[in-house]
Image (cartoon, rainbow, N blue to C red):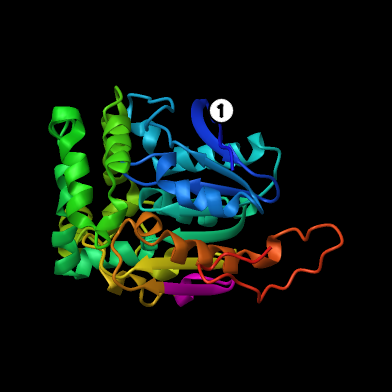
Amino acid sequence: MDVEHRFVDTNGVRLHCAVAGDGPLVVLLHGFPESWYSWRHQIAALAPHFRVVAPDLRGYNDSEKPRDVAAYALPVVTADVAGLVAAFGERDAVIVGHDWGGALAWTVAMERPEVVRRLAILNCPHPAIFVQHMRENPRQMARSFYMLLFQIPWLPERILGLHGAWLVGRAVERSVVRRDFVTPEMLATLRRNASKPGALRGGLSYYRALRRSPDARGGYPRWLRRFLWGDHPPKGVHEGPADWPKIAAPTLVVWGENDVALGRELTLGMEPLFTGPFAIKYIPLCGHWVQQEQPDVVNGHLLDFLADLIPAAPGATQDPDAHAENGRLEP
């Protein structure tokens, strides 16, 4: 399947997109410190049935890279996704996100539900659950300490960018379970894309913008919030899961169980956050980079989840229970 590379203007920013296939629109949102390339296996599996769009998020790889941290706030990048759906001539789309792309996908589903036909999340906790654990779970606080280090101005991107972003590649190598996916080509692409001018600053700006948001303040321990604001938290803070908008779109969560940064416990207790159908699939012996470590398993879960959206071939009767061994639908 040939992949077309094009630039799309949305919400005042120009995004580079990898585009393939035809059919219902599927938008794939990558995480840090990646690019559209992290979805290469999913593009190949989905494009025979769907029109697949995998953008470089603003600040990454070949997309535009605003300098202001405020340009990476979740409401802004949420508007990027909504504008991207419209730019491809659709009112809604299947939104799939991993890592930071998952955080963005959660937000789009809550704040712009009209553009989300289905939602699939890979190794990214719902913000309500993450905020709760950042208040109450010391182990998760320790795992997420890097997020505080990323708040330091300019120094993290300087260090991560040394020697052709060597540390970026090394961090991925050390955090995987299935090492066979870490090929020289994959590492070279990861490091090359991260080394482009402004790319690491853009990626880190998501973390910096998040710490300035009201929801991040909700993640502070209760004693610190009381010290800073007394019994009246700042406007916009979500105190608990009940304060978050419920998600109506059918939702699938796929989770590599051996994620070094995000514990499996972050997937528990999510059901009250949805009014629509919700399911979770765990993948054992798999780390954070789930769609690359176990692409056939992830592709099978996605195709099962989206099976009823696949247009039937003219004159053919589709059997949704017919699957190949690797999880792809039989033609």
- Residue at 15 percent of width and 68 percent of height: 139
Q: Which residues are magenta?
A: 271-281
Residue 277: quarter of image:
bottom right
Judged from the image, the secondary structure of the residue bearing numbered disc 1 is strand
Q: Amino acid at mark 1?
A: Arg
Compared to 294, does 325 lie above or below?
below
Which residue is nearer to you in this view: 298 or 96?
298
Label count reads 1
Q: Residue at x 53, y 68 (%)?
A: 327
Where does residue 308 sit, x and y in percent of width and height? 69, 67
Q: Quadrant of the C terminus?
A: bottom right
- Image spot of residue 275 (x, y percent): 57, 72
For residue 279: magenta?
yes
* Residue sitting at x 58%, y 53%: 46
Magenta stretch: includes residue 68: no
Q: Is residue 242 visible?
A: yes
Position of residue 314 in the picture relative to residue 321 (left or right): right
Q: Above or below — where is 162 with respect to 250? A: above
In this rendered view, identify the residue nearer to me: 238 or 79: 79
- Observer-nearest of 316 and 30: 316
The N terminus lies in which quarter of the figure? top right
Mark 1 neighbour class, 10 Å CA radius: few under 14, some 14 to 19, many 20 or more: few
User: Residue 170's spot in the image, x, y percent?
Assistant: 17, 45
Specify whether residue 246 is in view. no
Task: Report x, y in % for residue 300.
Answer: 52, 66
Task: Determine whether 71 is above or below 239 in the image.
Answer: above
Q: Which is nearer the eye, 123 or 109?
A: 123
Instruction: Give the residue displayed 55% in from the left and 54% down from the top.
Output: 45
Residue tagged 1: 6
